Image: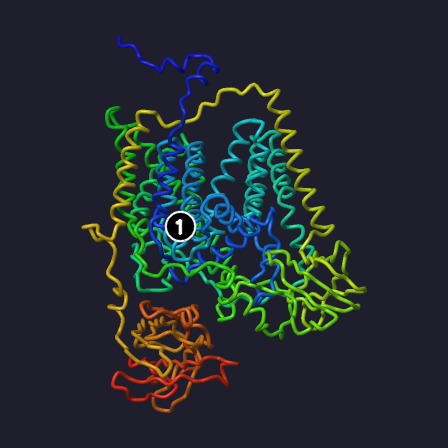
Amino acid sequence: MKSILTDPSSTYPAWMRKAMQPFDWGLFLAFGLGIIAGLHFIIANGSVPASQIEHFMFRAQDAAETLAEGRLYPRWSPEASGGYGAPIPVFVPPIPGYLAGLFTYIWTGDPVTATRGVYALVLGAAASLMYLFMRRILDAHSALLAAALYVFNPMIGLDLAIIQGDLHLLIGVALLPAWLWCLSRVDQTNKPLNIMQLSLVSATLVLTDVSLAIVAGAISLGYIAWRLANKQLGSRWWIILAGILGGMTLSSFFWLPAIAESHFVRWLPPMNGNPLDTINWLAPIRAVDPLLANPIPQFAPGWTHLSLVIAGLFTAIIKQSQRPALRLLAVGVVIALLVSAFPLSSNLQKLHLVASAFFLAGIGGSILLWRHHLPAIWRRLPLPTLLIIVWVGCIPVWLPPDLSIAEQSINDLAQVTYEVQGFGVAGLPRDQAVPVTIASDLPLNPGLLEGYQVNAVNKLVTSQFTADVQAALLDHNTHSDHFQLRASNPTTLSVLTACFPGWEAWADNDPIPVTCNPATGLIELNIVEAVSGELVIQLGTTPLRTVAWAVSAVSLLALCVYSLRQARTWNNPFEDISLLPVTDARLLALAIAAIASLTIWLHQPNSPIKLRPEPGFELRSAATAGFRSDVGLILLAYTQSENRVKPGATIEVGLYWGTGRDLTSNYQIQLQLIETNTGTEWLLHPYHHPGDYPSRRWQSNITVIDRYQVTLPIQLEAGNYQFAMQANDCTPDCESGHAVVFFNVDGNELGNKLRLPSRLIVE
């Protein structure tokens, strides 16, 4: 009779097994996979022109300058509102901009390099945290594959990170598995740092994206209810609630002033929406045309991911009794599929996108649970093989287009110029509302703009100086200004800085009353007696902000004290979790190193293997137009999804615009439908920036796609129709501004309405 061999370590006492437990190198391997997915941000110099990455570079610059001035936390965007400033950091979650600014201050000194590095590091963190969570509910091999599927998912690594550049949501991609990992630790262990970890992740969620934090709180409450109903959570439910409360109090320095001071600002509406399409589950991954300034996100997981997900669903059906977590992952995939059939708001669609990528990665990684059925000699091969397959199947993620357009200069003048030229606020994406305090009809100040051009920003209006009042600029900072002031008589000084609670001033160490001009929304200083000395104007604290910081500090102190007290009485029992064997880690390290080397090599311009698409390939499938205009606008090509429809039908129209020279105005386009015989016009889309990308930002070597999905009026009569465009510089408005004149390829004038050559037959 043959004896059954068992692992001798399983008979050892817990303290010995803990001492023999090796380090899990899978955490670093997962981080490496995430860095490979984001290697483009480290190697390349350019980015998608219409993405949000430039906005985060400007926020990084503001945060770095604030840190260099000795301030720990910014409350002011000095270059916003045409140089008057705005309290944007008070109301916008700070983590993305602050993290990039911190890297700028302590590491690179360049906000462009630092911000691009943050994108890559966040992808690496997302892979590592996904590995930690999946290792706890599945095993180490499945967890590493799930981490790769997570960051190499085109919806995350391509659409979200590269095309949209939404750093708030990208950090949320990393925080979702971190939050679930904390919940699973509370459920499975009684470690002293559980509350601290839950609190820190909760606070980071609030400081990154409030909507994600709300969803995380809802998940926690549902999890508590479910586990209590099954009588499996015991008394640990209070740890989860304490962690949520700890996160709220830790982040109170942000949300408490944001709520209490919201009535001091008015909100400018977003310059354009950021609608998200539903997930295209069955669509293949398409490469991005390097010529497109504003490529459309695809939101498709791709066939490689779908193949592994199908195999993972089969695994879940067979092995759900052994791994109960598989049931939850499979249900999550099914729910994500069902939700795709319903229209969602922009915020819900973002959450659906991240959740779908998470469930797809988890269920796809589960197929490695079958590796135990293979002979022992073959068990090490499936994981590196599948990692290579995932890498090959997601080429557009790690090898995006080689854009010849690098980011513009990131400095104070660039921020002001960005806004003056009508592009929006430099430090905020165009789809976000802007908090301002200045009057709506306050014009730009020419002297202030000139000060930015010569790097001598003077916030005191020089026209108010007389023989009795003289002032000279000493220093201008993000949150303060210093002047040498001499005033012989009482006077009122106008300051070119927007009002907001906390502004204070003093001259020669004597406080000066600060008031707000209700007509302009700017600061005024009321000097009540003669003064000669240094005038300091700075944004200080308020009683509310001081209380908020005190709440955060006390909360952090309480969490530290509690964790230390728990650690003293905790005997640190052995936790038998799946770890990646050292022998497997060595093979995987070789495979990942090879993948990284090939990725770097294929990024090189002189690489003999060309995997990137040719520039302009997307225009080849469109109908050539070639219509020019008197201002430089060129309609290069167009697409029309249908030529024969019925009233009420939905049709897609795509217009590919370009320019032959630098444009001097932000021209806007409206789309019409014209009956060819009677000339009856139907307005389908009002004036807007083509492709939501202002035309003054266009360059001669890029193409801007303006895509429409329009529903035809139900009252349309049968007949022949044509789509038509009208362009206007909309200065001062779209009705009275200059109407653009179009010409055909032969130079013949076509007038102000440009009709597409294709006909639309309505039956």
* Three-letter code, disc 1: Ile
Q: How is the image coloured?
A: rainbow
Q: Residue at x 27, y 68 (%)?
A: 619
Horizontal relation, residue 595 to residue 77: left or right: left
Rate crowding at label 1 as few (under 14), some (14 to 19) or many (20 or more) other CA atoms within 10 Å: many
Horizontal relation, residue 607 to residue 682: left or right: left
Q: Secondary structure at mark 1?
A: helix
Whether residue 389 is visible to the viewer of this picture, yes or no, is yes
Of all residues, the one furthest to the front in this rendering is: 467
**Residue placed under numbered mark 1 in the picture:** 156
Depth order, front residue of 48/62: 62
Q: Position of residue 121 (x, y in %)?
A: 42, 43
Q: Quadrant of the N terminus?
A: top left
Q: Position of residue 379 (x, y in %)?
A: 27, 28
Depth order, front residue of 533/636: 533
Q: Quadrant of the C terminus?
A: bottom left
Q: Residue at x 40, y 50 (%)?
A: 156
Q: Position of residue 145 (x, y in %)?
A: 35, 38
Q: Residue at x 72, y 72 (%)?
A: 467
